[in-house]
């Protein structure tokens, strides 16, 4: 299989993705906790600035109430959990990487009103059920997860997410997307990450169609979308951090 595929749809190995995050940094010491999930290993200041800009921008697009329940899919080290728990919202984070979850537990140990769960996006319903979390949510975040999923599992996961929403619900979706046609990287070595990296960069229009098809049928509409970062914080030629906020 080619390491770099443009346009065509191919499946990726979840084992490769898990290996990447379980051994994030490949033995080197990362300079900041946000580097684990926002990368930029040689430029931690950029990761910190991106984190700050994302939280400020997206939080202003959402409504916040202390009695709410929020599900953070792909919670990683609990980066958003820091912000959410400060607002008094009940927080449930789920991630496929035990390594990242262990960091999240330490990162969020001073907060109450939270639960961290090990599980995958495509098995979200069974993962929550095993933890006896059978409620529905006021807010759901899907942040940097979909690029690591094959098409069939992505569609299944999104359908399941729709089933987890309360009648009134907001969903924040953020992903690295291709500026042009779909681009798949399959075990390409990254000098900056010092590891092999695998991901599917779908186009913005492809994600928009998925969202409108799956969530539109359940009464959701896209209320905001766009490039997440200002030009000064961008450093990629073929991909873009892009977001959607949808609401019902």
Image (cartoon, helix red, strand yellow):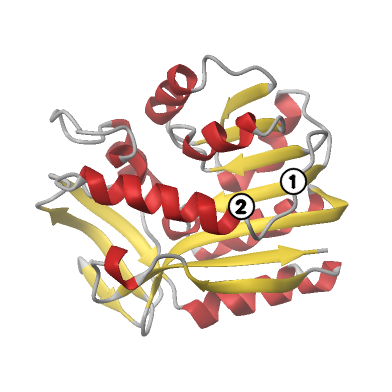
Residue 109 is situated, as x and y percent measured from the top left of the image, at 52, 15
Q: Nearer the viewer, residue 195 or 72?
A: 72
Ranked by sequence position, the earlier of labels 1 and 2 is 2
Q: Does residue 143 appear in the picture of this structure? A: no
Q: How far apart are the alpha carbons under marks 1 and 2?
A: 8 Å
Report helix, strand or loop for mark 2: helix
Q: Secondary structure at mark 1?
A: loop
Residue located beneath label 2 in the image? 59
Residue of label 1: 64
The foreground one among 171 and 214 is 171
Classify residue 232 by image quadrant: bottom left
- Is 116 located above or below residue 184 in the figure? above
Q: Quadrant of residue 98?
A: top left
As drawn, is 219 to the left or to the right of 221? right
Can you tell which mark lies on residue 12?
none
Point 47% across, 37% down: residue: 79
Q: Position of residue 236 (x, y in %)?
A: 25, 69
- Residue 9 position, x and y percent, is 41, 75
Quadrant in the rendering for residue 69:
top right
Q: Mark 1 and mark 2 in contact? Answer it, CB < 8 Å.
A: yes
Local packing at callout 2 (Cα closer than 10 Å; few below 14, some 14-19, many 20+) is some
- In percent of the image, x 48 and y 19: which residue is there? 105
Rendered view: 202 above or below 43: below
Residue at position x 26%, y 60% from top? Answer: 186
Q: How many marks?
A: 2
Q: Is residue 203 left or right of residue 69?
A: left
């Amino acid at each position: 299989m080619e390491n770099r595929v443009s346009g065509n749809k191919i499946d990726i190995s979840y084992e490769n993705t898990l290996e990447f995050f379980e051994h994030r940094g490949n033995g080197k010491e990362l300079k900041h906790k946000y580097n684990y999930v926002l990368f930029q290993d040689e430029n931690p200041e950029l990761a910190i600035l991106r984190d700050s800009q994302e939280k400020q921008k997206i939080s202003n697009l959402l409504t916040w109430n202390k009695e709410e329940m929020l599900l953070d899919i792909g919670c990683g080290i609990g980066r958003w959990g820091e912000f959410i728990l400060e607002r008094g919202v009940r927080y449930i984070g789920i991630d496929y990487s035990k390594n990242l979850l262990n960091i999240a537990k330490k990162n969020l140990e001073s907060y109450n009103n939270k639960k961290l769960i090990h599980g995958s996006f495509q098995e979200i319903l069974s993962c929550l059920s095993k933890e006896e979390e059978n409620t529905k949510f006021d807010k759901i975040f899907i942040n940097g997860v979909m690029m690591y999923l094959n098409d069939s599992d992505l569609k299944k996961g999104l359908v399941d997410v729709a089933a987890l929403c309360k009648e009134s619900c907001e969903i924040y979706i953020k992903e690295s997307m291709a500026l042009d046609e779909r681009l798949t990287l399959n075990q390409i070595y990254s000098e900056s990450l010092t590891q092999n990296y695998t991901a599917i960069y779908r186009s913005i229009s492809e994600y928009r169609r998925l969202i409108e098809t799956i969530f539109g049928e359940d009464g959701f509409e896209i209320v905001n979308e766009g490039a997440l970062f200002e030009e000064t914080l961008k450093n990629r030629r073929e991909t873009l951090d892009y977001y959607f906020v949808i609401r019902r």
